[in-house]
Amino acid sequence: MGGPLIERILPRTVQGTILLGLLLMLGIDLALEVVTHRRTVREGREEAVQANVELARATAAAFQSFVGDVLHQCRAIALHFSTAVPTEAAIEHLSQMTSEMPAVRYFGYADLEGQVAAAGPAGDPEVLRHLTDAPYFRAIREGAEWVVGDATPGRGPYEASFVIARAARGRQGELIGVVFAMIDPDALVSLLAPRAGGAAVALIDRNGRGVVRAPTLLLSWAQRDWVGRQPETARALRGELVTGTLASPVDGAPRVAALAPISPLGWVAVASRPESEVLAAVRREIATEVGLAGVLAVLGLGLAFLLSRRVTVPLSKLQAGAGQLGSGSLKARVEPRGPSELASLANAFNAMAGRLADRERELSEEVARSGAAAAEAKRQANLLQVVLDNLPEGIFLSDVKGRLLVANPTARQLVGRELSASVSMDEQAVALGMRKPDGTPYRAEELPISRALRGEQVQRQEVVIQQPGGPEVTVMVNCAPFTRDGEIEGAVALFQDISPLKEAERLREEFIHLISHDLRNPLNVVLGHARLLERRALPEREEKSARAIGAAALRMSKMVDDLVESARLEAGKLSLERRPTSLAELVQRHFSALLSEEQRRVRVECEAEAMVLADPDRLERVLSNLLSNALKYSTGEVVVRVRRQGDEVDVTVADRGPGIPPEQQAHLFERYYRGEARHREGLGLGLYISRMLVLAHGGRIWVQSRPGEGSTFGFELPALAPLEPRAPA
């Protein structure tokens, strides 16, 4: 039905077709305009949302800064009350503090029984009479260091307030009272308003009540229940950044808003703008563009109608020329006439006819060049064969059924016999007696080729091959499938002879045995005799010599231990006896073992909950290396810290020594590296062994240092159990 209707409206002529095409183009353009305008609206809303997110976060930062300032003042007041002060002087001090912060109605101080001992000039006697039931007072009594309380109703129907409190402690750190500040939310508007621009910003407490809003609105206590009026507030209070077009909790009007959690406080910062204001400029722009598009569409239709009358004759000429070209006359040409587009079309037709004639000539030349291409392909195949024949690794290529396709000379040399192309690779491997390193024969389905044909990537699999009448060869096999259009067509395997590496491992074991037994025994004898001489009453010169012999033997024994342990670490043969270990207890135990002179230089800061699953003897070795270096290369205080950082535990050793140049820091944990320090004893293995031990525990080790400012060495290990989040006070 649609076809005849279109034919009645626009006859089947060139002119009608052009007009129909133009209408279709206008329809497509209109659709694109609609899509563009929808995207413009969406982008405008997204820009407003992003601006609100930044504003909400800035508001949160400003409020956190304000809380920090108030807590700082509370701390100063707490210090003031840590000594006996007369009530008049205390009130005068609180009044002075209050005058310095306009948003604070008054400061107050209460003892541990909740009795207010002093308050600023604006204190309400009824409110300040006793604080035992106040949530913030109970929270500090239960261990919180500071608390930001939730909003409470004020004296008037449109007033509210909240409290910021901090623990007051005595000289020994004991809790002696609570310093609190009663905050006037309306006075906070001056803090938030300069950041708002044309938007509204607000703060919501943990109970979901609106505490502060800029610009200021008169809100009753019921109207401040935003979590009940705006369900999205509950998501923000759970720590989620909430954005979008939300109903205002004040009047229900749609607003483009962002609710940013203030994580340390459990509050939420809000920034919003009316949706109508956000989209007003976008809608004006869309209306202008739609009007302009309509005018252009009308002009385009009129112009197309006029121009269509000039194209019929040139098109007829083109039709005749196309007929001649279709009949095989490649010499057919058309005279360019009519509008420039049709003239260009005629020129394009003539160029096409010329290219067809040229292509006919080129086809004959292609036949001549195909012979040269075949020769080049053969040369490339020969080059690939040369590469395969000279590779030091063995290459096996099989089809999807496991039958051998290619095996280079190195591969045949490794297996020691010729391989059949008619028998599958896994059957031949079983016949060859391929074994695992422990001597167990491989089953057919365990072989690398079989696994690769099942789609697996086989890497670094050791295989032992018994050559006929020859030695055993240990090879490292890497094998992978190759596919076409997602289907496995075969597999390629690379065999690398690692027999020399196995021999090197055997020699390393002999070296470890030599160092740990044949060299350590005479050292123990020398050390034992040196200690025996030290116990005897000898002349000063002989006693000094005995001590020197003992010290040298100890240094050499430590070098032997370092060499043995580094060799075992590199070989991966150092076993760890892991068990739940408190790093705080380990550090304290090591600190207790220090000489009294060293203890006076070391300060320890530990967290009792820093537990890891580790070998405590190995970790004490790491700690001993770091601490002994800090004591050796500095003369001042050395600080050892153990801290829990999320799911990790950090141990740092900081000194105030000369520091380490940046160009040396990258090499500190390398084997045998000793840098350019003035203490050059040892082999330079201490930090290398420390790094290997930390890596064996699944951790990492690092250094931070600046010349002239000291150095901090530290390592990080996974915590034994995740740290559970604390509920806000």
Image (cartoon, rainbow, N blue to C red):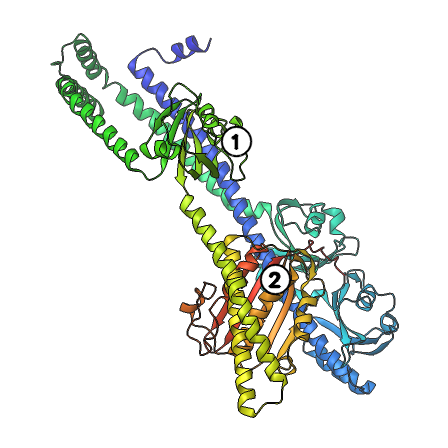
Q: CA distance from mark 2 to mark 1?
A: 38 Å
The numbered mark at residue 667 is none
Res 137 visible: yes
Examine the image and state in which quarter residue 707 appears. Answer: bottom left
Residue depicted at x 88% and y 73%: 113
- Which SS class for mark 2? helix
Given the image, on which type of amino acid does mark 2 rest? Answer: Arg
Q: Are marks 2 and 1 in contact (CB under 8 Å)?
A: no
Vertical side of 285 occupied by 164: above or below:
below
Q: What secondary structure is marked by label 1? A: loop
Which residue is depicted at the point 74% across and 53% down?
208
Question: Which quadrant of the rendered structure holds the C terminus?
Answer: bottom right
Q: Earlier in the sequence, mark 2 or mark 1?
A: 1
Q: Which of 364 and 292 lies nearest the eye of the viewer?
A: 364
Q: Which residue is mark 2?
A: 618
- In this view, the residue in front, 169 or 289, is 169
Q: Nearer the viewer, residue 382 or 264?
A: 382
Q: Is residue 480 above or below residue 308?
A: below
Q: Is residue 578 above or below residue 333?
A: below
Residue 333 appears left or right of 711: left
* Residue 592 on image: x %, y %: 68, 75
Read off the residue under disc 1.
Answer: 442
The kind of residue on which mark 1 rests is Tyr
- Circle nearer the viewer, 2 or 1: 1
Q: Residues within 10 Å of mark 2 (few under 14, many from 20)?
A: some
Q: Would you place residue 659 above or below residue 133 in this image?
A: below
Residue 184: image quadrant is bottom right
Does residue 626 appear anywhere in the picture?
Answer: no
